[in-house]
Amino acid sequence: MSLMQAVRDRFNPFNPSTQPDREPIAVAADPAVQLQVELKAVITALLQAPTPEAQAEIYRTVAAELSASGTDHDEVRAALSAIYPDSITSAQLISDNLAAHGYRKNVAANTAAHGYGGNVAANTTTIQPEIERRPSTIPASAPTEMALPTYAGKIDYYEGSLLAETIAGGAFSIAIVGAPKAGASTLMRAFIWPMIYRPSGQRPTIELIDTRCDYWQGLEQIPGLVVPVTIDDMSAIQTIALKIEQVYGEVKERQKLFRAEGRFAVSYSWKPYLFGINGWGEVMDYLAKLTPKQVEEDEVLKPMFTRLRYILAQGADVGVSCLLTARAHDRIFPDNRSLEETQLLLLGRLTDDYRGGYGAIDRAINDKAQLPAHGDRAHLMALLSYSKQVGQPVLVALSGRPRMAKLPDLSEHNHHDFARAYNRLKPY
């Protein structure tokens, strides 16, 4: 049986009974070439898999077939190297995932004795992005196959300081995404506190809207800084829309001044201005009952979205920063194009009470519109799987090259200079 035939027989979307018109893969005379053909078909199936669970099922099936046929590891590595001649990392990722899902040395006889789904399935480590669990202690008597995968040594975390890099350019536009208790609001406070402690002449104008009634660590006691808005009717949405309109006007006024300065505008020093909405995802959740047409035709909602996009895209050029928090990246704006206008930071962590989690990162990694490259998704998925097993809090930046870094304890640095504090923590 070929590798791809095994995938079709065991994985429903590729089952011949559901797709009877598929042509069988041609058999090459050279076994090495045939293996390349089969693996290319498997990689195509992986790219088309709709979920991480579907990818894991394909990996398990192919790993069992390779083990049962006695295919040597060197042959598989040579075939993958031929498929990815310019990307050793991509070839290694496929090889590592096959190993993690049951393709091991000296298991052919065991697999033949038990058939598919025997001991191979029991001895694999499956990538399960939607399952959040506490790190478990592996008994000393457990077999070698049950050990945690060595992803951290081969596909390591980004060694730079993602948070310091984010604010290095001065003004910024950032969407912070994380499950409840993952730390999105804490990270938002960490961005704000160093601005509070600047000299009075350099202290920015700060205006925050809070829809979650979060703990602000004293920031709520500063008059006019935090405005609580409970999202329970359209009047709350209108309140937020009016504030967005005000900030939009500030950006337009600064752009007008910039043009008036002419050639001297480049050296103009803008007074910092920070606008934030803690719980923008709650606004989108409330509006989810409306159709796109209703939003487009509403005299309040249409300009609100248009103006907020403008602030995110143009504000940083004139010293206006914007911070948003949400529970999922697809609860920030009603279209993917809007996400291209801001930096996206994703948080994942578990807490002692089992709240929080990595769900926000899972959803973004599985979004092929957000991460179209299979190599990027596989890289982050493998590293996220490792992070879940060891309980490592992580931060993912999707702007530019997708990167995942370890997330330190933010609460210790809320009252300190943000950039210097995180530069001292490198590498993390």
Image (cartoon, grey):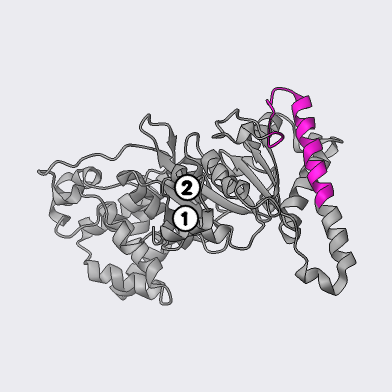
Majority secondary structure in the magenta region: helix
| Residues rendered magenta in the picture | 223-250
Residue under label 1, please give it.
421
Quadrant location, the N terminus: bottom left
Farthest left residue in view: 141
- x and y percent of residue 407 in the render? 43, 50
- Say if 292 sits above or below 344 in the image: above
Specify the amino acid type for callout 2: His
Residue under label 2, please give it.
413
- Say if 118 sits above or below 317 in the image: above
Specify the amino acid type for callout 1: Ala
Farthest top residue in view: 232
Binning the other alpha carbons within 10 Å of mark 2 as few (below 14), some (14 to 19) or many (20 upward) gives many
Q: Is residue 226 magenta?
A: yes
**Which residue is at 25% across, 50% downward?**
148
- x and y percent of residue 131 in the render? 39, 38
Residue 372 lies in quadrant: bottom right
**Which residue is at 40% across, 72% downward?**
83
Which residue is at the front of the view, 328 or 83? 328
In this view of the protein, can residue 250 be seen by the observer? yes
Residues tagged 2 and 1 counted as in contact (Cβ below 8 A)? yes
Q: Earlier in the sequence, mark 2 or mark 1?
A: 2
